[in-house]
Structures are given as C-alpha cells and as structure tokens.
Image (tube, helix red, strand yellow):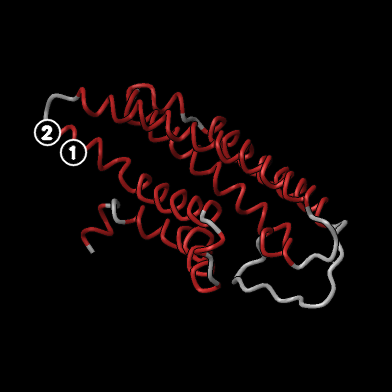
C-alpha cells in the first residue's frame, strides 16, 4: 500500500507537468498542436510519468524496508505518508530522510520548474494577443489546470515546509487530504466545467 501511494503521488506530480506541456502546445503553437500532441507523444508522456512515479516509490520503499518498528504503530494521517512513518521507527532514519529529501528536491523541483516554464510561455503568449476576447479564450483554456496545479503545489509545499512548532494532527490531516485526495477528486470536476455539454446541463 505504501509503494502504491508513493507511485501514485510521483505520477500525479509529473502528470500535472505533462498537462502543462499540453496547454503550452495548445496556446503557444495551436497550428501544430495535433502534430506536437499526437498519440505517440501522449503515450510517451503518460509512460514517462508512470516510470518516474514507479522509480520514486521504489527508491523510497527500499529504504523503508530496512526500518524496524516497535511500540506505537499508528499514523495520524488518512494515508501512509513517509514523514509520519519515519517518526515511528525504532532505529535511526537519517538515511531515509536524506533519500526522501533528495528525491523530493530532484523530482519535485524539476516537475515544478517544467510547469513554471510552460506557464511563463503561456502567459507571455496570452499577453501578446491583441483582442480581449482572444485573451479570455486562451486563458480559459489553461485556467482549470492552473487551479489544480496551484492547489496541489501550495498545500504540498506548506505541508512539507511548515515549522514543527505549528504542526498539529488536524492541520497535517487537512493538508494531507487536500493534496493527496481532494486535488485528484477535483480534477474531473474542474476540467468538466470547461466542457460545453456540462455547461449546458
């Protein structure tokens, strides 16, 4: 279960980056969108996100397997996240913390910067559109994805960077639910709001 949760989390982060590239292709180069986002490219993007998620989960799971747990064995979370799990270990967890931090920094920041660069190009393209209607149409194309990205990264960033002095079980659970469960559940709702049939209904 732990491996599945980590693989799903890693995949979700890079899927948001792949979707940012899709929005970039649609807004910045609409005439070549079909060529840039053909079936082969889409398969490669999805396969790549799953491969990265699998690697992230495998890397952290291997190091968790060497831990020993004794005494209290309840995590005050709705999902099996690594930081609370490390607190339950009876042995030193420095190696696990270094591996977790390194994998988050490398994978998380690379995904974040890929998404950020895509949106810098998107916003600069939107600002160059002369008509207000054209700018509105282009922005509405990426606004749903931007909301999901903002919710995901903001709550995840706050959860993992907040000082331990402001940490509480309720606050940790709320942030954990937001970036691990609610963002994924909101994806279909947020994206379907742009669907003409849904708007009509």
- Local packing at callout 1 (Cα closer than 10 Å; few below 14, some 14-19, many 20+) is few
Residue at left offset 57%, top offset 30%: 40
Q: Secondary structure at mark 2?
A: helix
Residue at left offset 45%, top offset 58%: 183
Where does the image place residue 37, in percent across and percent down from the top left? 46, 30
Q: Secondary structure at mark 1?
A: helix
Up-down relation of residue 16 to residue 130 (above or below): below
Camera-side residue: 156 or 127?
A: 156
Where does the image place residue 144, in percent across and percent down from the top left? 33, 48
Figure quadrant of residue 14:
top right
Camera-side residue: 127 or 103?
A: 103
Where does the image place residue 35, in percent across and percent down from the top left? 45, 24
Whether residue 121 sits left or right of residue 168 in the image: it is left
**On the rendered image, what quadrant is the C terminus found in?**
bottom left
The residue singled out by tag 2 in the image is: 132
Label 2 to label 1: alpha-carbon separation: 6 Å
Residue at left offset 50%, top offset 58%: 179
Figure quadrant of residue 141:
top left
The residue singled out by tag 1 in the image is: 136
């Amino acid at each position: 279960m732990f491996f599945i949760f980590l693989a799903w989390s890693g995949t979700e982060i890079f899927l948001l980056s792949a979707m940012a590239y899709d929005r970039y292709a649609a807004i910045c180069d609409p005439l070549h969108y079909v060529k840039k986002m053909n079936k082969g490219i889409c398969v490669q993007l999805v396969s790549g996100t799953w491969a990265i998620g699998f690697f992230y989960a495998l890397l952290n799971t291997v190091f968790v397997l060497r831990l020993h747990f004794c005494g209290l064995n309840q995590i005050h979370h709705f999902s099996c996240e690594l930081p609370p799990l490390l607190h339950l270990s009876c042995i030193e967890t420095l190696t696990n913390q270094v591996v977790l931090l390194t994998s988050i920094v490398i994978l998380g920041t690379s995904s974040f910067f890929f998404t950020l660069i895509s949106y810098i190009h998107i916003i600069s393209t939107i600002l160059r559109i002369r008509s207000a209607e054209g700018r509105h149409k282009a922005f509405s194309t990426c606004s749903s994805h931007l909301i999901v990205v903002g919710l995901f990264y903001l709550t995840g960033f706050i959860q993992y960077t907040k000082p331990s002095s402001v940490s509480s079980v309720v606050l940790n659970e709320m942030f954990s639910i937001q970036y691990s469960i609610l963002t994924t559940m909101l994806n279909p709702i947020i994206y379907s709001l742009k669907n003409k049939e849904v708007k009509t209904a």
